[in-house]
């Protein structure tokens, strides 16, 4: 049985890009209007670790009020993207779900 997002803190990935805004989406089977939960970030020009806490993923405005991300059913991860038709440069690697927030740098 799929665990879904139970017990997870968020998503972590290394990104390198063109300084533009991007979003990563996480979907739930229960969301049927294609308004998946999104987290927006800026892709720096150097490799940078991006941490996206699950409680910061939001549905786009105009979405039907959907269930939160803490469900147990099968989920979708379509990957990062710009969200429009403009040219972009984005690389990502080491995508993983994390169970706790990364330690803060001193």
Image (cartoon, rainbow, N blue to C red):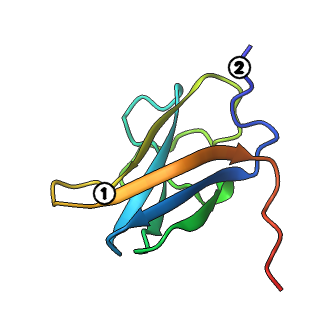
The disc, 1 or 2, on the residue closer to the chain's N-terminal end is 2
Q: Which mark is residue 50?
A: none
Does residue 31 appear anywhere in the picture? yes
Q: Which residue is mark 1?
A: 82
> Residue at coordinates 43% horizontally, 64% vertically from top-left?
16
Q: Residues within 10 Å of mark 2 (few under 14, many from 20)?
A: few
- Report which quarter residue 48 is drawn in: bottom right
Above/below status of 55 relative to 104? above
Judged from the image, the secondary structure of the residue bearing numbered disc 1 is loop
51 vs 32, left or right, is: right
Between the C-alphas of marks 1 and 2, the distance is 29 Å
Position in image of residue 42 (x %, y %): 43, 71
Looking at the picture, how far across and down is residue 44, in whole percent?
43, 74
Asked whether residue 59 is in view, the answer is no
Q: Residue at x 60, y 65 (%)?
A: 49
Identify whether 76 is placed above or below 85. Answer: above
């Amino acid at each position: 049985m799929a665990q879904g997002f139970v017990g997870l803190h968020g998503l972590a990935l290394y990104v390198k890009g063109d300084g533009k805004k991007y979003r990563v989406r996480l979907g739930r089977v229960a969301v049927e209007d294609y308004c998946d939960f999104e987290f927006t970030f800026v892709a720096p020009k150097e490799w940078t670790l991006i941490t996206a806490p699950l409680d910061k993923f939001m549905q786009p405005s105009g979405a039907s009020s959907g269930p939160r991300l803490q469900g147990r059913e099968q989920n979708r991860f379509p990957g990062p993207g710009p969200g429009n038709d403009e040219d972009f440069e984005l690389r990502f690697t080491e995508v993983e779900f994390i169970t706790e927030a990364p330690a803060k740098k001193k």
